[in-house]
Image: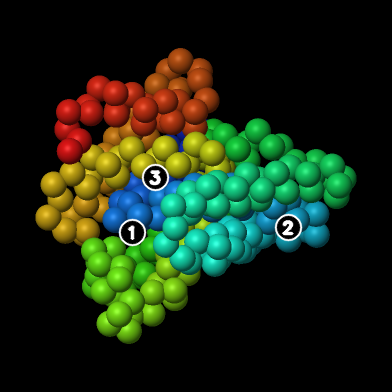
Amino acid sequence: MIEAVFANWWALPFLMALLIGMLCPATGALLITHRRLLQANLISHAVVPGLVLALAIGVDPSLGGVLSGVIGAVIAERLTSKKTTDNEAIINTVLAGTLGLGVLLIPLLEIRVDLESILFGDLLAVGPADLIRTLLATITLLLLLKTSYQKLVYLGLDPDGAAASGLRVSSLRLALGFVTSLVVVSSMSAVGVVLVIGLLSAPALFGLNQAPSLHTAMLRSACYGLLLSLLGFLLAIAFNLSPGPLIGVLCLLSLLFFKRELP
C-alpha cells in the first residue's frame, strides 16, 4: 500500500516539503511571540553533537539530536536567566560551541557523517522514517497547543505577569524547547539544521502581521510557508537544483519583495 502511494520518486519529497512548509512557520510564529527565535537558532545547531553521538553508538540519530537540542536550550536558559544585555552574546556563544563540538566529534569518534546533508538537507533523499518523524513533531506541537494554549498566549504577552501569577514559566519554556527540537530534527533531512531557521522565520513574519490571535497567526504562517515550500520544490525540480537551499533563498526574496507588508 505504502509502496503504491510513493511509487513516483517525487511523491515522498513533495509530501515532506508540504509538511515542513506548514510545521516550521507555525512553530516559528509561536517562537516569535515568545521572543525565543534566537533560542530556536541555537537548538538547530545544538542538535549536531547528539546526532553524531547517536550515530556512533548505533541508535536513532533523531533521538540524540532532540536530546542535545534540549540540553543546549536548557544551558542557554540557565545562562540567560537574568535580564542583561549580554543574553544574545551568551546564546550565540552556546550556539557556536555546540556546533563546534559536533564537528569535532566526527573525527574523534572516527565515524562517517555527511555533514553537508545535516547542515543543508537533501529533500529529494528523504525516506518514510523522515516523514514519520515530521508527523510526530506535528502531533507534539498540536498537543502542546491543546493542553497549554491560553498559558502560552499569556506567557508570550506578559512574561513577568505570567511568572508573578504562579505560572510554571520554566516548564512551559522547556516544553517549547522540546517541541522546537523535534521540529528542527524532523526538518533536518529536508532543509538542514542551518536553513530551517529561514522557514521558522520568514513566513511567520507575514503571518503575525496584524493577526488578531496567536491561532490565526500560526495558521497564516503555515499557509505562507506552504506556498514557499511548494514553489521551492517545483522550481528545484524544474531547474535541477537542491530544494532546501532554494527554499531558503525564497524566504529571503519574500522579505525583499514584500517587505511593505510587514509592520
Across and down, in percent, residue 248 comes to 43, 31
* Foreground tag (1 vs 3): 1
Q: How far apart are marks 2 and 1 (CA)?
A: 31 Å
Residue at image x 34%, y 47%? Answer: 25
Residue where numbered disc 1 is placed: 34
Left or right: 2 in relation to 215: right
Q: Which of the 4 image quadrants contains residue 228?
A: top left
Q: Which of marks 1 and 3 is nearer the N terminus?
A: 1
Q: Can residue 62 be seen in this view?
A: no
- Does dot 1 land on a helix, a strand or a loop? loop
Q: Residue type at mark 2: give it.
A: Ala
What colouring method underlies this structural image? Answer: rainbow
- Does dot 2 land on a helix, a strand or a loop? helix
Residue where numbered disc 2 is placed: 54
Q: Residue type at mark 3: give it.
A: Leu
Q: Residue type at mark 1: give it.
A: His
Checking the image for residue 200, the label placed there is 3
Total numbered circles: 3
Viewer-side residue, 169 vs 90: 90
Residue at image x 60%, y 52%? Answer: 94
* Foreground tag (3 vs 2): 3
Q: In this view, does 135 lie above or below 221?
A: below
